[in-house]
Image: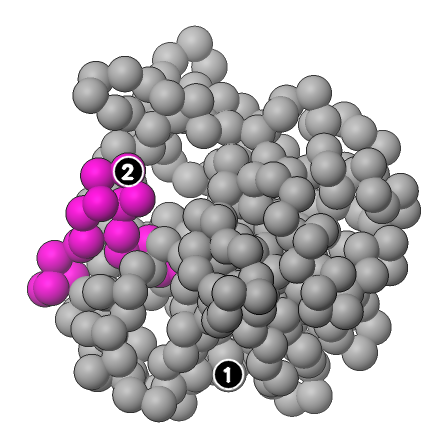
């Protein structure tokens, strides 16, 4: 499996522009996938530089209903007329971040919800052999406190987001179980445990943001929480590639515990799993 980072907050060099957000190109034996898209057309520019033909993408997965992961969907659909786009049915609901007492819209374009290429997903969905999407992560161990500033419209009310619109991908290929997540709002420990329940096996690799940094307040989660997550992730032989909402300070703190088993993905990076 090949994974190329088309959009992330940082870049491997000045050859690649970067922006707060996420977009991975994933090439398996059977599919060419984009996991998230970011919030503008930067994924197109970097795809061309990295040898990715957007017209050949056959699957798009939007991890959750926030602008930095899926608002570029309209741009993608203008450039690819055949790929199926898998997204939670409630990811198009209104989502907000609270700043100075105001609710700032951070949601997606709801007019795209019933686009013919969009496939609305539920709690668990087998996309194809070796590709499983899941959400419905109920446990809240090692939960990020910055989630408390994120809200969603539920019925007539605006409530603290429960992140039921967040989904993750399990890729089973060549004896490896690979978990790809977006911001891990429901907690990377909880998502990992749920994935291992689904496959009834240990996860070999995890590619995900860990949501330990709030870009609006610029606050990092406590050293206690970061340390606990790192120690919990150390308990088996899983390897981790992280980025985006983990933040560099939290990354280096976790690397003290996980050492060579933790790496950072920047725009322009390419790995083979």
- From the viewer's perspective, tell me whether residue 190 is left or right of residue 270: left
Q: Badge 1: few (under 14), some or many (20 or more) residues near its Cα, within 10 Å?
A: some
Q: Badge 2: few (under 14), some or many (20 or more) residues near its Cα, within 10 Å?
A: few
Q: Specify the label residue 204 is tagged with.
A: 1
Given contact means CB atoms under 8 Å apart, are the residues at marks 2 and 1 in contact? no
Q: Position of residue 175 (x, y in %)?
A: 65, 88
Of marks 2 and 1, the one in the foreground: 2
Residue nearest the viewer, comparing 45 with 125: 45
* 216 shown above or below 159: below
Q: Quadrant of residue 262?
A: bottom left
Highlighted magenta segment, given as a residue range: 209-225
At a point 37% along the width and 49% down the height, the residue shown is 185
Q: Label 2: which residue?
A: 216
Q: Quadrant of residue 146?
A: top left
- Asked if the magenta segment contains residue 272, the reply would be no
Helix, strand or loop at label 1? It is loop
């Amino acid at each position: 499996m090949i994974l190329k980072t088309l959009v992330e907050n940082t870049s491997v060099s000045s050859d690649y522009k970067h922006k707060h957000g996420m977009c991975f190109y994933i090439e398996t034996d059977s599919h060419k996938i984009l996991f998230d898209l970011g919030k503008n057309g930067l994924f197109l520019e970097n795809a061309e530089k990295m040898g990715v033909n957007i017209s050949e993408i056959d699957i798009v997965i939007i991890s959750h209903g926030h602008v930095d992961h899926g608002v570029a969907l309209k741009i993608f659909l203008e450039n690819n007329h055949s790929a199926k786009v898998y997204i939670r049915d409630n990811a198009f609901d209104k989502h907000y971040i609270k700043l100075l007492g105001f609710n700032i819209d951070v949601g997606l374009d709801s007019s795209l919800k019933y686009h013919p290429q969009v496939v609305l997903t539920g709690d668990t969905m087998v996309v194809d052999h070796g590709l499983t999407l899941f959400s419905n992560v109920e446990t809240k161990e090692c939960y990020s406190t910055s989630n408390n500033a994120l809200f969603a419209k539920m019925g007539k009310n605006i409530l603290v987001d429960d992140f039921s619109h967040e989904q993750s991908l399990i890729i089973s290929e060549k004896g490896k179980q690979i978990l790809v997540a977006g911001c891990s709002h429901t907690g990377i420990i909880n998502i990992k445990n749920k994935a291992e329940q689904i496959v009834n096996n240990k996860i070999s690799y995890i590619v995900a943001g860990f949501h330990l940094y709030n870009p609006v307040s610029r606050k990092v989660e406590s050293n206690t929480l970061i340390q606990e997550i790192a120690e919990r992730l150390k308990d088996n032989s899983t390897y981790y590639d992280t980025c985006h909402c983990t933040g560099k300070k939290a990354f280096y703190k976790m690397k003290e515990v996980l050492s060579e088993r933790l790496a950072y993905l920047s725009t322009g990076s390419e790995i083979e799993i």
